[in-house]
Image: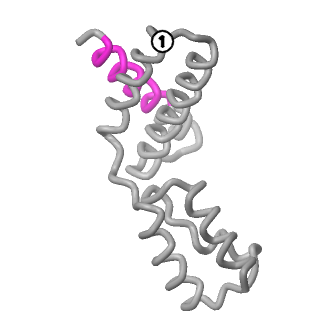
């Protein structure tokens, strides 16, 4: 229970920090920015898990995995690689993208892991 509370407090603090950062620039936090904060937090947790596994700290691995599951519960469901591939093929054909330079047009922000999108799009565009 305490791990869940700590994770939620961390998420809340990260969102507040983003809110303050944007307020100084005259903006407000959008849902997309909250998703970015959550994705960043999840990535930090995954990196910590890898580090703790390498160091043999199974107690900390378990804690980070639990926190990661909490963070992920607030994230939208990500598309699978197959879904990304199908959409990438459709968008590449529709937009006439022909090189890796066109990749920015093809991002599915917040709907899929950017690394998965990047890998799929690069493979499709370099295969042409």
Magenta includes 30? no
Magenta includes 10? yes
123 to the left or right of 91: right
Quadrant for residue 28, please give it: top left
**Element carrying mark 1:** helix
44 to the left or right of 3: right
User: Residue drawn at (36%, 21%), measured in percent from left and top?
Assistant: 7
> Which quadrant is the C terminus positioned in?
bottom right
Residue 91 in sight here = yes
Residue toward you, 24 or 91: 91
Q: Residue furthest left?
A: 1
Residue 28 in sight here = no
- Above or below, 104 against 9 in this view is below
Quadrant for residue 124, please give it: bottom right
> Which quadrant is the N terminus positioned in?
top left
User: Residue drawn at (53%, 35%), measured in percent from left and top?
Assistant: 43
Q: Looking at the picture, how far across and down is residue 65, in whole percent?
A: 41, 24
Q: Which residue is mark 1?
A: 58
Q: Looking at the picture, how far across and down is residue 33, in whole percent?
A: 47, 47
Q: Looking at the picture, how far across and down is residue 102, in whole percent?
A: 70, 77
- Above or below, 28 against 11 in this view is below
Please, what is the dominant secondary structure of the magenta stretch? Answer: helix
Q: Which residues are magenta?
A: 3-17
25 to the left or right of 7: right
User: Residue drawn at (40%, 29%), measured in percent from left and top?
Assistant: 68
Q: Looking at the picture, how far across and down is residue 73, in whole percent?
A: 29, 38
């Amino acid at each position: 229970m305490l791990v869940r509370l700590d994770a939620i407090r961390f998420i809340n603090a990260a969102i507040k920090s983003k809110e303050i950062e944007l307020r100084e620039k005259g903006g407000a936090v959008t849902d997309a920015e909250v998703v970015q904060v959550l994705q960043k937090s999840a990535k930090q947790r995954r990196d910590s898990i890898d580090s703790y596994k390498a160091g043999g700290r199974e107690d900390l691995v378990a804690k980070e995995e639990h926190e990661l599951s909490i963070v992920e519960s607030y994230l939208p469901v990500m598309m699978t690689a197959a879904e990304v591939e199908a959409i990438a093929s459709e968008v590449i054909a529709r937009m006439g993208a022909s090189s890796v330079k066109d990749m920015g047009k093809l991002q599915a922000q917040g709907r899929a892991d950017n690394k998965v999108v990047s890998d799929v799009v690069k493979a499709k565009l370099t295969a042409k």
